[in-house]
Amino acid sequence: MNSLLKTIIINTVKHSNVVLTRHPGIDEYIVKDNTGKTLMEYTNGWDYGQYVLTINGTKFEIEWYENTKKALSQKQQDMFDILHEITGRYTELERARNATMALTTAEQAIIDFLNGKTSVKAK
């Protein structure tokens, strides 16, 4: 994979929403922009040794098995770097969702104010 393309993919993931669907032996990640449009899909078929990244109909695929003793090829390394970014972003968003559920009313009011959703409170 071209290094510029890889960098753009990783930067896109850093600013996107990531949705995870789990199936036996497969994790499917969908990366969406802030309007909900799907930007890319990554199928992590860890149990089957299949990894597929799909962007706008273009597929990048690798095979890799846990018991493989050979070093990763550059293509495999690129795919795993992207996967790690996607899983990291998903974890970050999941932690934020969990933290949001634990906010007090006063804390939520502060966040709303800082995000411009409410006006200044009278003194």
Image (cartoon, rainbow, N blue to C red):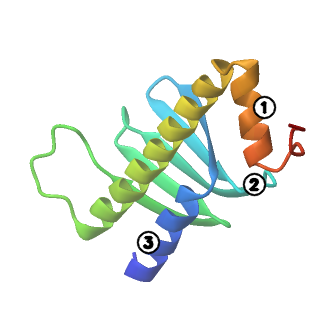
Front one among 121 and 35: 121
Query: In the rendered view of the protein, which quadrant contains the C terminus?
Result: top right
Camera-side mark, 2 or 1: 1
Residue at the image position 78 percent from the left and 56 percent from the top = 37
Mark closer to the chain start, 2 or 3 = 3
Q: Position of residue 114 (x, y in %)?
A: 73, 47
Numbered disc 1: secondary structure? helix
What whole-number distance in Å separates the C-alpha atoms at marks 1 and 3?
39 Å
Q: Are marks 2 and 3 in contact (CB under 8 Å)?
A: no
The quadrant where residue 110 appears: top right
Q: Which mark is residue 6?
A: 3
Q: Earlier in the sequence, mark 1 or mark 3?
A: 3
Mark 2 — residue? 34
x and y percent of residue 46 in the render?
A: 37, 37
Relative to 5, say whether 66 is above or below.
above
| Residue 117 image-quadrant placement | top right
Which amino acid is tagged 3? Answer: Lys
Whole-angstrom CA distance, mark 2 to mark 1, is 23 Å
Alpha carbons under labels 2 and 3: distance apart? 21 Å
Which residue is more in the foreground, 95 or 40?
95
At horizontal 48% and vertical 33% (from top left) the residue drawn is 26
Query: x and y percent of residue 19 in the render?
Result: 63, 39
Give above or below for 44 relative to 12.
above
Label 2 neighbourhood size at 10 Å, few (<14), some (14-19), many (20+)? Answer: few
